[in-house]
Image (spheres, helix red, strand yellow):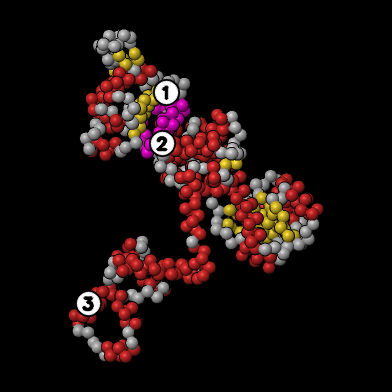
């Protein structure tokens, strides 16, 4: 996420030094030479961080800090001055300044303070966004998500919640299919009526029919009393059939009849009963593929699949990791009776980098474990996270640590040039110097590849390298040689390739 910085100073050398020191990735810097210009900038937009000189030609840096506080602007401010006094520092901090820097300053010092301020501001902005998410999507219960994929899920829920069409929810295990089913029920016209969930894969096959339809007294040897099935229990409400793909074939036929006729018969009963439950089914496998393999009835699939919702994995919606983490943390902290504060920047980055094979369920379980075992729930550190999550952060950090020694030795541009030359040459060798195939592999146009080869000094033909390495005498010896027409045609075809 890009952060914004406003630097206010009338000394152009100071501005240039700050530009160089704060040449940070994803940081957009704006400069103002005096206070009035800074005020105009603040009228037009909001900045994450403001670094202002104390002594300006028109107004003081203190006035800028006062305006930020008076208007409640969500900006952090760092004051810098060459007239450092304890009184100035205390006054600036009392007014709400984040920190205080004296001139002349060291680039490393400014960079460190700015990075710390931006990290704190990032967490504050994230918290504001999370609160907005919770307020905006509170109607959907525990479904949290700002990703584009989840926004589409919210739209579908709003459209289908008040109709009785059957819904099929698919997605990997742990993505929250039952949570979505509950949201459809809780926000729709059947709200307040029963929501009954059944995991078709967790009930023994010989008991599944009784679980669905129930039985009457005397239906079988141990049927000493009548028993309601889930269709009857969910009457007027919603019946959620999880892992619908595990339903055995004869029960698929009976379920199809219930969906078509809107009635069923309990075991041992001769009379049919009205089925007044909305069906929401879920599967963690591709039902179309199971139909093609003959493992799921095609007619049942079409009857169920009136409305289809695909829940993305957590890996496909990484931007939802942070709001989900905040939601689960507060939920678990309330249950445990502890005061939850926040995750540190390093901990959040590790959680963002981790693959989450168990999806949202794994994230929720990880947070519950972390809150139970951490030393200080008000501040969750990287060290508090499970080893597998910490490993993703350490691996990401280790990858970056190997680059600076090369960059410092060659310079960034030279390093990137060498990397590009190495990659292009390797792909050309792989495809026998056929530039069209190499360009396709590199996702480039052929002309673009040729231009880059020329720019990086890569020979257009493999034999050019050999020619360049031959002695000058050998070059003169072959200079007068004229290839025959067939050889010339062959070389022409190679050049065109």
Classify mark 1: helix, strand or loop: strand
Q: Residue at x 26, y 12 (%)?
A: 220
Residue 208 within the segment the image draws in magenta: no
Looking at the image, tell me whether mark 1 or mark 3 is earlier in sequence order. 1
Quadrant of image for the C terminus: bottom left
Residue that badge 3 annotates = 490
Identify the disc placed on residue 195.
1
Residue 420, how many percent across, how many down? 41, 67
Residue that badge 2 annotates = 174
Looking at the image, tell me whether mark 1 or mark 2 is earlier in sequence order. 2
Which stretch appears magenta? Answer: 162-188
Instruction: Give the CA separation, mark 1 to mark 2.
Output: 20 Å
Residue 460, how many percent across, how many down? 33, 75
Identify the disc placed on residue 151.
none
Q: Quadrant of residue 294?
A: top left
Q: Which residue is drawn at 32% across and 20% down?
A: 211
Mark 3 Cα-neighbour bin, 10 Å: few <14, some 14–19, many ≥20: few
Classify mark 2: helix, strand or loop: loop
Q: Quadrant of residue 108?
A: bottom right
């Amino acid at each position: 996420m890009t952060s914004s910085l406003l630097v206010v100073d009338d000394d152009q050398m100071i501005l240039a030094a700050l530009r160089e020191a704060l040449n940070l990735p994803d940081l957009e810097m704006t400069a103002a030479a005096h206070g009035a210009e800074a005020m105009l900038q603040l009228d037009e937009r909001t900045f994450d961080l403001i670094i202002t000189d104390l002594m300006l030609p028109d107004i003081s840096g203190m006035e800028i800090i006062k305006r930020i506080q008076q208007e409640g602007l969500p900006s952090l401010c760092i004051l810098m001055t060459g007239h450092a006094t304890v009184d100035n520092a205390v006054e600036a901090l009392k007014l709400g300044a984040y920190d205080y820097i004296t001139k002349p300053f060291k680039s490393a010092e400014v960079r460190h303070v700015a990075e710390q301020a931006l990290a704190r501001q990032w967490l504050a902005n994230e918290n504001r966004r999370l609160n907005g998410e919770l307020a905006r999507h509170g109607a959907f219960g525990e479904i949290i998500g700002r990703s584009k994929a989840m926004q589409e899920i919210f739209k579908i829920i709003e459209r289908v919640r008040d109709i009785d069409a059957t819904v099929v929810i698919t997605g990997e295990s742990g993505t929250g299919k039952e949570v979505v089913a509950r949201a459809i029920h809780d926000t729709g016209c059947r709200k307040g009526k029963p929501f009954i969930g059944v995991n078709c894969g967790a009930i023994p096959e010989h008991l599944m029919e009784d679980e669905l339809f129930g039985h009457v007294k005397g239906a079988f040897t141990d049927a000493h009393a009548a028993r309601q099935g889930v269709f009857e229990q969910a009457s007027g409400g919603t019946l959620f059939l999880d892992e619908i793909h595990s339903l055995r074939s004869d029960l698929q036929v009976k379920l199809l009849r219930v969906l078509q006729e809107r009635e069923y018969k309990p075991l041992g009963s001769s009379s049919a009963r009205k089925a007044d439950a909305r069906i929401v089914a879920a599967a963690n496998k591709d039902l179309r593929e199971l139909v093609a393999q003959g493992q799921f009835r095609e007619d049942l699939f079409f009857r169920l699949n009136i409305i289809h919702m695909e829940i993305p994995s957590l890996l496909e919606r990484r931007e939802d990791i942070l709001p989900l983490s905040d939601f689960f943390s507060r939920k678990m902290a309330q249950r445990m009776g502890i005061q939850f504060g926040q995750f540190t920047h390093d901990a959040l980055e590790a959680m963002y980098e981790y693959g989450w094979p168990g999806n949202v369920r794994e994230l929720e379980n990880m947070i519950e474990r972390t809150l139970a075992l951490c030393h200080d729930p008000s501040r969750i550190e990287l060290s508090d996270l499970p080893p597998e999550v910490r490993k993703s952060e350490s691996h990401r950090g280790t990858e970056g640590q190997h680059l600076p020694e090369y960059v410092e030795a060659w310079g960034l541009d030279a390093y990137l040039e060498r990397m590009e030359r190495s990659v292009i040459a390797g792909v050309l060798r792989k495809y026998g110097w056929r530039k069209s195939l190499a360009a396709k592999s590199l996702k480039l146009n052929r002309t673009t590849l040729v231009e880059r080869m020329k720019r990086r000094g890569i020979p257009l033909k493999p034999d050019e390298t050999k020619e360049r390495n031959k002695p000058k005498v050998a070059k003169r010896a072959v200079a007068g040689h004229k290839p025959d027409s067939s050889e010339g045609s062959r070389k022409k075809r190679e050049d065109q390739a």
